[in-house]
Image (tube, helix red, strand yellow):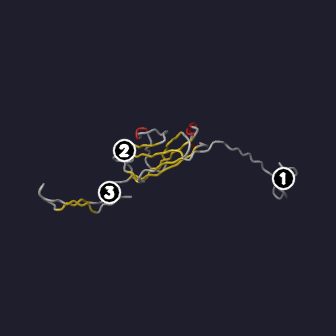
C-alpha cells in the first residue's frame, strides 16, 4: 500500500494501488500429440480406425473424449478395442456409420487425478483431431462389353464410369 494516496473516488486527484498475489507451480501441462490417420477421411466398414496419441516428453496419464460436434456418440466400451484412458484409441470397424465428421480429443496430465474432472484440470494438455467418414462411391455404372458372350470364349471388357466420391 502507498501511504498518503488519495482515495479512488470520482473527481479525486491522485491514485491508489492494488496488490496482486501471483504464484507459480513447478508443474506444466504436457504437450500432447495425435498422429492423424493416413487420410482424414476414413473408411471403417472393413478396418478399425486407430489414433495414436502421446506426449512430446516424459510420461503421462491419458483420457480420450469425443468433442460435442453433433456427430453420433461413439466412445463407449462396446465400440472400442482400447480403453478411454490409454495412449491410443482404436474404434471397432463398422462403428463410424454416420456420414459427417468426428472430433476426438486426447487429454494428458502428469497427475492422473487431474483427469477426473477435465473442466478444472489445471495441469492438463490436450490435442484433437477431426476425421470424416469416407462414404462409398456413388452414381456410377459398370459397363460390360460385349453385353453377351460365351464363357472361356468371349473376351469381356469391364469399365467403371461416372463414379463420384461424395464429400
Q: Quadrant of residue 14?
A: bottom right
Distance from label 2 to label 3 (Cα)? 19 Å
Q: Is residue 82 above or below residue 140?
A: above
Mark 2 lies on residue: 93
Query: Residue 89, image x and y in percent?
Result: 45, 43
Q: Which comes sooner in the sequence, label 1 or label 3?
A: 1
Q: Is 151 in front, or is 57?
A: 57
Q: Are marks 2 and 3 in contact (CB under 8 Å)?
A: no
Assign a secondary structure to mark 3: loop
x and y percentages locating residue 120 in the rendered image: 60, 42
Residue sitting at 51 percent across and 41 percent down?
A: 63
Direction from residue 155 to residue 121 in the image, left or right: right
Cα separation between marks 1 and 2: 69 Å
Task: Give me the C-alpha separation between circle 1 and circle 3.
Answer: 74 Å
Label 1 vs 2, first from the N-terminus: 1
Question: How far from the left and from the top, in percent, is residue 29?
Answer: 59, 45
Res. 86 mark: none
Mark 1 or 3: the one toward you: 3
Which residue corresponds to the image point at 40% horizontal and 46% vertical from the top-left? 49
Q: Which residue is tagged 1?
A: 7
Q: Read off the residue under disc 3.
A: 137
Q: Position of residue 76 (x, y in %)?
A: 44, 40
Amino acid at each position: 500500500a502507498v501511504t498518503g494516496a488519495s482515495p479512488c473516488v470520482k473527481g479525486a486527484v491522485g491514485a491508489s494501488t492494488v496488490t496482486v498475489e501471483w504464484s507459480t507451480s513447478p508443474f506444466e501441462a504436457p504437450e500432447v500429440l495425435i498422429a492423424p490417420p493416413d487420410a482424414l477421411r476414413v473408411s471403417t466398414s472393413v478396418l478399425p480406425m486407430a489414433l495414436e496419441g502421446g506426449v512430446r516428453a516424459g510420461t503421462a496419464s491419458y483420457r480420450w473424449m469425443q468433442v460435442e460436434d453433433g456427430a453420433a456418440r461413439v466412445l463407449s466400451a462396446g465400440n472400442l478395442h482400447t480403453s478411454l484412458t490409454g495412449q491410443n484409441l482404436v474404434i471397432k470397424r463398422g462403428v463410424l456409420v454416420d456420414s459427417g465428421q468426428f472430433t476426438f480429443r486426447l487429454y494428458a496430465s502428469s497427475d492422473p487425478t487431474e483427469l477426473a474432472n477435465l473442466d478444472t484440470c489445471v495441469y492438463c494438455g490436450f490435442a484433437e483431431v477431426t476425421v470424416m467418414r469416407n462414404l462409398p462411391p456413388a452414381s456410377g455404372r459398370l459397363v460390360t462389353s460385349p453385353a453377351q458372350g460365351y464363357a472361356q470364349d468371349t473376351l469381356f471388357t469391364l469399365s467403371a464410369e461416372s463414379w463420384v466420391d461424395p464429400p
